[in-house]
Each structure stands twice: as C-alpha cells, then as structure tokens.
Image (cartoon, helix red, strand yellow):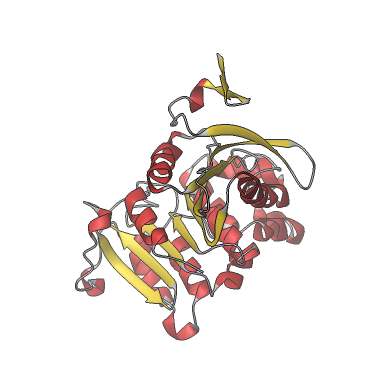
Amino acid sequence: MMLLLGNTLATAATQQYPELVIEHHVESSIDQSKQPGLYYFPREPDSTFPLLVALHSWSGDYRQKAGIPLAEWCIKQKWAFAHPNFRGPNWSREGCGSDLAVQDVLDAVAHVRKHTRLDERRIYLLGSSGGGHMALLMAGRHPEIWAGISAWVPIFDLSAWYTECQMTGRRYAKHMLQVFGAPPHQSESTRNQYLYRSPRNWLHHGHSLPIDINAGIRDGHEGSVPISHSLNAFNSLVPQTDQIPAETILELTGATQLPTSLVQDDLSDPHYGEKQPLFRKTSGSIRVTIFDGGHESIPQAALHWLSLQQQ
C-alpha cells in the first residue's frame, strides 16, 4: 500500500512517524540518483533552528522505527530533523561507509538548508550500531559541520569486527563479504578497503569536536559489537596521556559486569534512567561511557548531551 505524503510517496513503514515528518527524495551530488529520507522543517519568521541528523543502524534504512522518538523530540523542541537513507543497509558496495553514503549525509544537510533556516552552530549527528559507525566516520571525514556527535555501540574497525563476527557466527561477516568481496586478510588491497570505510582510518581528524561515545557493558556478549570498539575510538581521539590502557580495555571487554578494580565514584546520571553509567572517561570535549546495558542506545541521554553542545 502506498500513501501520498506531502508531495512524495511514503510506504506504510513510515506511517507511524508524526504527520509533520515528510519523505523527500534528494539528488545525490555524486551519481545524481534520488535518495530517500525523512525530514521535518520547522518554520517561524526570523528564527533559526538546530538540526538533528539521525542515522539508521547496520541492517536498517531511513524508515527505521527507532527514528520516531527522535523525530517527535525534534518537533517538540523545534529542531529540524533529517533521517537519510545513505544507501540503506550495510550489505551492498554502495552502503557501509562508501563515498556515496558519506555524500548522502552531506546532501541531506544541504537539503534541510533549502527548506528552513538552520542555526549553523548547532548541527548534530546521532547514530547507534551501524549508525554509530557512520557517525564516527562522518566525524573524521567532515568535522567542520558538526556541533556535536553522539555515537552508541559503534563499529570502529571493520576488519576487527569481521573477525569477531566470523568467530561468533554472526551474519554481519557475510554482509561485509557482500560489500568487499573478500575477507580483510585476503590481500593488502582488501585490507585497505576495509580500513578506508572504518572510523579507525579517519576519526583522529575529529579530535577537536565534542564527541560522546557510549556502549553497554554486555555488548559483544549479548550483543554484536564488543565494547573495545568504543574504547579504541576514544583512544584514537585523545592525547596518549589520556588514553585508556590496553589492559583496561581487555578487562572491560571481557566482562559482563564492571570489574571491582574499575569502580568509579559518583557516576550517577539521571538521563540514563535504569541503565546507569558504570565507567566513564573524559578528555577535553571527548567522552566515553560504558553503561549498564547491552547493544542499545538511550535516546534521552543522547539528546540531552547534544542539546548542550554548540560550535
């Protein structure tokens, strides 16, 4: 079933989004294809508005239901909202952090500028899992745009994640074979392709940005992305003196509960609800939090932190 939504067609999967959220197809600056996305444009005379760019997860697309509470929050707060497709699920060569996918996110921001007046000091990026991978990739490839980036349970290193997924039998290893055509260890050329699409290759360029990285301590056990990805992402952004020691990363990654030796005082944060922070490290504008949870995000914590950031 298809419904007419605004001046575009929307599938039934988008019907649960608020009526003010409109499906638009945006022309890619690279290949001129029409790329779908969901958008909300606040309009008031003589006003400018922050923008939240929300990124879908690894196997999702722009219709993902996880974007609904983010869109609702933006409407309530009078923020613009963009939920681009960036080539859909990460199992095709066009997706998974390709140049096409990166440009689709940039084109989405440009598209919002055409329809509403943005506060250029308050353009934010939020993603979880595969969206966290893309958020960190955008932080490194285009740090000039963002006032703050919130990445949850992200993939930092695709080569490492391929090996981890292959060892645990998770389907994401097959997805990466569809993207790259071979495992990362097959050749130097293949390794470089995995690296090129990994935040590991780019993220250090975003060291001056406010970046908040979060992971649930049980991820990698009950979930699909070991928390070493979040901890190593933090280390790639901060001076060596502030980096988390390798032995601490190993200890945290192997645990499903916080080791007694790593307990920190006074980490209570009401925005995390029942999934309170267990371990937190901050260096300048970079923060990493390991919370009492698994492979998930906490939207209210992400949105609160982003709302405090400004270029």
Residue located 72% across and 47% down the image:
100
Q: Would you place residue 215 above or below residue 45 in this image?
A: below
Quarter of the rendering containing residue 286: bottom left
Assign the N terminus to one quadrant of the image. Answer: top right
Point out the residue furthest to the bottom here.
241
> Residue reaching furthest right?
31
**With 64 as the anchor, is 218 left or right in this view?**
left
* Residue 289 visible to an observer of this rendering: yes
Residue plotted at (22% across, 71% down): 263
User: Residue 22 appears in which quarter of the rendering?
Assistant: top right
How far across and how far down the image is residue 43, in percent? 52, 44
Location of residue 58 in the rendering, given as x and y in whole percent from the top left corner? 53, 43
The part of the image, by quadrant, that contains residue 39 is top right
- Does residue 298 appear in this view? no
Relative depth, front residue between 229 and 7: 7
Nearest the eye: 65 or 219: 65
Residue found at x 38% / y 75%: 282
| Left or right placement of residue 246 versus residue 2 in this view | left
Task: Measuring from the top left, give residue 30's x and y in whole percent.
Answer: 78, 47
